[in-house]
Image (spheres, grey):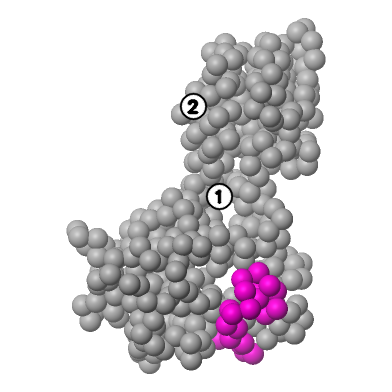
Amino acid sequence: MKKKINIVLPIAGKAQRFIDQGYLVPKPLIIVDKKHIIDWALESIDLKNINNYQLIFVVRLDHINDFALDEILKQKFGNDVKIVVVDHITEGAVCTCLLAENYINNDDELLIYTPDVYFQNAFNPNNIEQNLDGYILTFKANSPAHSYAQLDKDGYVIKTVEKEVISENAAVGVYYYKTGKLFIKYANKLIKDNIRTRGEFYLCPIYNLMVQDNLKIKTSQVEKMHVLGTPAELEFFKSYVAPKFGSKPIGLCSDHSGFELKETTKSVLKNFGIKYIDYGCYVNKSCDYADYVTPAIKEIGGDIDFVMAFCRTGQGINIFANKSNKIRAALIFDEYTAEYSIRHNCANFFSIPSKYVNENKIKELIKTFLTTSFDGGRHMTRMNKTINL
């Protein structure tokens, strides 16, 4: 039978970038799509299927005094949560987690989660192999912004590095130790040996010390990964990832060559129970698609979050829509292009060629839109390069 799992959540960072952008509340309490960041983060841990766990939050004193963060956490996650209060800036996440030593310096299992991310599917540490001493949850990435784990041929961790790409296995921010005492031992050794990255004590390098002592550590990859650690990352998540197809009316637009398929799509959406707003054209008469795409894209982020647009090849409306900074338009003609336009490109504008798509295909496309979400991770890194052109 599995022992109790202590789950430490260090949320005592200053979050200076959010302060600089005018955010007043602590980062865990910033609202994204009707939920606080801490709610999004905790949805990524499968708490309802963990038999015996203890949540331990490490919280800034000023966030307690000014925002009653301790009381809010108890309201959200139960009065039995433990609150560790920090009245100073620590030298990194390791030092912050060590402040919870009174709760974790024991034989209970330990999970440390730096909760400024949202990932899927939800993680249950009860599923970790019994013989492992440590475990790192990872996602596929290629950006030096993350921590990385290198594996041997049998899948065991042989090296971890901060801010350097040594593999495709980037750390999500979920770190497991077979016992809390194990973490305390190696965390203190990290500090004693003054092993810092950019002047701070990071969590991932602790595993190097464990590897040196022949302890067994493995990893597994999450399917979808979204970082909420900066205002820009949060804004992208809020604008493009959190909105779900069908939760608001779908915008529709076309030129004359796409008019009939647009009208057909109205009936299909109605059968799915999905509302729509028709931005034109309104009659099958020669016209310019730009006149109808323009009002549709102006409403994205307002009355609508997604647009389905139609012309003969889909090319013209696609090129025009992508001229707008807030639009991620993709040419769609089957389920595969629909799925990956969302999974890899986070599309919010679907350009559909009336020459190649019929009513049955529209039904399949809508089913795909309803059941697909952005993968994040390395695809977010790639998109940042297009966003920042």
Residue 345 visible at all: no
Where is residue 232? Give x, y as percent: 64, 57
The quarter of the displayed image where residue 184 is located: bottom left
The residue to which callout 1 is attached is 384
Q: Is residue 85 magenta?
A: yes
* Badge 2 density bin: few <14, some 14–19, many ≥20, Cα 10 Å: some
Q: Quadrant of the C terminus?
A: top right
- Residue 335, label in figure: 2
Q: Residue at (61%, 87%) from the top-left corner?
A: 86
- Residue 41, label in figure: none
Where is residue 225? Give x, y as percent: 49, 54
- The kind of residue on which mark 1 rests is Asn
Q: Is residue 387 magenta?
A: no
Q: Residue at (74%, 71%) from the top-left corner?
A: 25
Work out how far the residue at label 1 is from the one at label 2, CA to CA, in angstroms.
Answer: 25 Å
* Badge 1 density bin: few <14, some 14–19, many ≥20, Cα 10 Å: few
Q: How many marks?
A: 2
Does 59 sit left or right of 169 as displayed?
right
State which mark lies toward you, 1 or 2.
Answer: 2
